Image: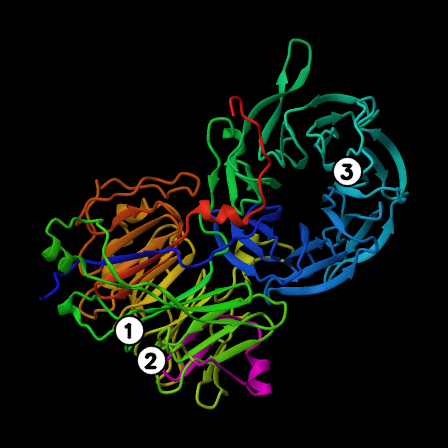
Amino acid sequence: MKLRPGLVALHRTTLIDWQPTPIVALAATPDGTVLAAARESGDIELWETQSWHCFLRCPGRDGSCLTCLAWAWDALGGTWRLFSGSLNGQLLEWDLQTRTPRHACDSFGGAVWSLAPQPAPSGREPDAGVAFAVATDDGAVRIFHMEPGSPGLQYARTMPRIESRALSAAWHPSGSVLLAGYGDGCLRAWHVPSAREILRISAGAGTGQEGLCIWAVQVLPDGTMVSGDSHGRVQLWDANFGTLIQGFQQHKADILSIAASPSGDRIFASGIDSQLALFARVSGKREQRWAHLESKRPHTHDVRALAVLHVPGHHPLLASAGNDAQILVSRIPRFQQEHPIRVCQTPQRPLMQLSRVPSPVSTADEATGVVSPPALLLNGQRRQLDIWQLGQSIHPSIQQERERGWAEGSAVRLQSIPIRLAGIETKGPCHLSCAAMSPDAQWAACGNMQALHVFRLGSGTKGRYSAVHPPAIKRMRLSPEAGRHLSGATSLAFTPHHLATALHDGTIALLDLETLEVVRSWTEARRQPDTCLGPGARPAASLQLLPAVDRLMADEGGRWVAAVGPAQVHIFDLATQQHHARLPLPQDIGLVTAAAFSPKGDSLAAATSASRLVVWDVQPAGLSRWSQQTLQHPPEGLLAMPGIPSHLSFNPDPQVRTVMIQTPTGMCSADLSKPPAQGSGRKRKRRSALKPADGHATAGRNFRVIKLEQPCLLLAFTSSSSAVLVEQPWTEIWKSLPEPMYRHRYGT
């Protein structure tokens, strides 16, 4: 019985134990183009705020306990620099090219609770460096200095020590006065040049409340001081006399973070009760007063961090994050009218790859109703690498003939369930930065920012594994020279005879699988310094911090390797071991977020953060005719996809030109041999990341969009007539997160 074309059996599975970790700190660059997020696992993520694409991840380590982040501009070096504090008392500067700590120093006071960069006064020299206020566990606020061109922070001086923990710090706009909150319930203002206390405020005076902690402080542009404490109170204080201006008891538990709008007329507070509260200046009959205007609970768990992003010429944004592992963003002027938007439904997405290989337990062919042999799925998280064998399904067209009445969306029966074949745990505390499996499932590799690990999975089996005959894993020993050369890998891709490795600086290295030696290196994909900027110019952080290469891929024939970065795509020819071409990227299509080779290897497709699809012809190294026709009038269905594309998968049948485009919350099927469905003809504006649109779901329509109910981790073809969708509902993820605060509801 011949299968009808166009039918795909979709295998939906939740076999991956995906566990994103809470976010403990947020920090935005002063130009508002990049948001850094620190997670409880030690991962640091950089998000580009135009499209909300996570373009860089610094892998964490076991035992990481980050508490705070801060940015600074180095005028002498012409770079943006990122610093962090942690509970182990370390102050780290991060090298965002190697994605590892660049310099570490001791806080000299134990755990670091707050790291506040000094604002830049108008009279300061541009190359004078930046001072940081560090609130530590021993009760002292210390000043550290970032010297331009010099790594790390250097200790400068200490404010007088208090017999209580220093929990929070914020600078006065003048840059000479520092406000600190302590574990004894007091706020103290320090004159930094003289290390003299100029103001002391007891936030809990007269309340009879003991054990008050000031977890968050903020100083507004007019000098007004704001505090948030462990009893859920937001209080505003006069900067000259320390008197209470106003106080609010809106929160039911500890306030962990406070943020203010650039103009200082709006204050946001968040904490353990998952509440985002807005306080604003309002005009009264006699004078201006502060009032509570709005409270929302867009988060399900504690909100531990707030950050305000101010991009010149745009509305300022409020970003919030916490124990539910998600970042939410809202426009500050529209906070009362609009609900915050989740920037990504699949944070900390696992390292996943699908390999289509035969298995001895799958001897049936399509005539009996079996779509394909089980495929293998590689999954990497933290320090663990798992290999799964997927289930086996009956094609819907066969089931339709047997049961009469099959319709689209009906469940298909499985002949076998998914099986975990093997697990590999890497040594050391460093988490994985990349992972890959060879097309024949005989090799696997993974790397962190310190070492590359290569494993042979079987000898002579050609990927034919089962629960009875699992792969025999053997770790291969690289030569010292190859090990040093391949350290710091950010992406991997197997060909039939080689392992291609992308290093942190954009170098592409080729490892021979027989000799385990590096046989070729290319440097063409390295980013070139921007010579268009004049002396002293400050580039946008989002442009300067983009990695050169963030993913590698090889075609099935093993001739081509593509090095794909957010802003460039390079092709390397393995037959000649030469750099083939740099593919042209059209303007105004956003950052490249996903890519894939066609089955014949003659085309390379890429999806971008602006929901565009670009297809190149590899041999002539130019845009395909299809792309030339559609770039001016992109498919409306693709533009309406919810979320940013995260994965592409071509149908493995060389005669079929179908590609599936996946976002965390949607999927789109596109036939590249046909023109996209024509729209209304009106020119569409580029969709804002804060205004997701509804997708189209008309059956049979090219570029048909289907929304997904659960977060999608991977969507890929397993054969010409079947695909797998790996998903995980948030209700299961919440079980691994810290319990939210219990709130008694009336009638329960």
Residue position marked by numbered label 1 in the rendering: 601
Q: Are marks 2 and 1 in contact (CB under 8 Å)?
A: yes
Q: Quote the CA–CA distance across marks 2 and 1.
A: 8 Å
Mark 3 or mark 1: which is in front?
A: 1
Residue position marked by numbered label 2 in the rendering: 559
N-terminal of the two: label 3 or label 2?
A: 3
Q: Element under label 2? A: loop
Q: Position of residue 352 (x, y in %)?
A: 42, 64
Quadrant position of the N terminus in the picture: bottom left
Q: Position of residue 573 (x, y in %)?
A: 36, 80
Q: Nearer the viewer, residue 419 or 475?
A: 419
- The part of the image, by quadrant, that contains residue 640 is top left
Q: Which residues are drawn in magenta?
A: 472-500
Q: Element under label 1? A: loop
Q: Is 324 left or right of 111, judged from the image as shown? A: left
Residue 695 painted magenta:
no
Neighbours of disc 2 within 10 Å: few (<14), some (14-19), many (20+): some
307 vs 84: above or below: above
Disc number at residue 174? 3
Q: Is 234 left or right of 476, judged from the image as shown? A: right
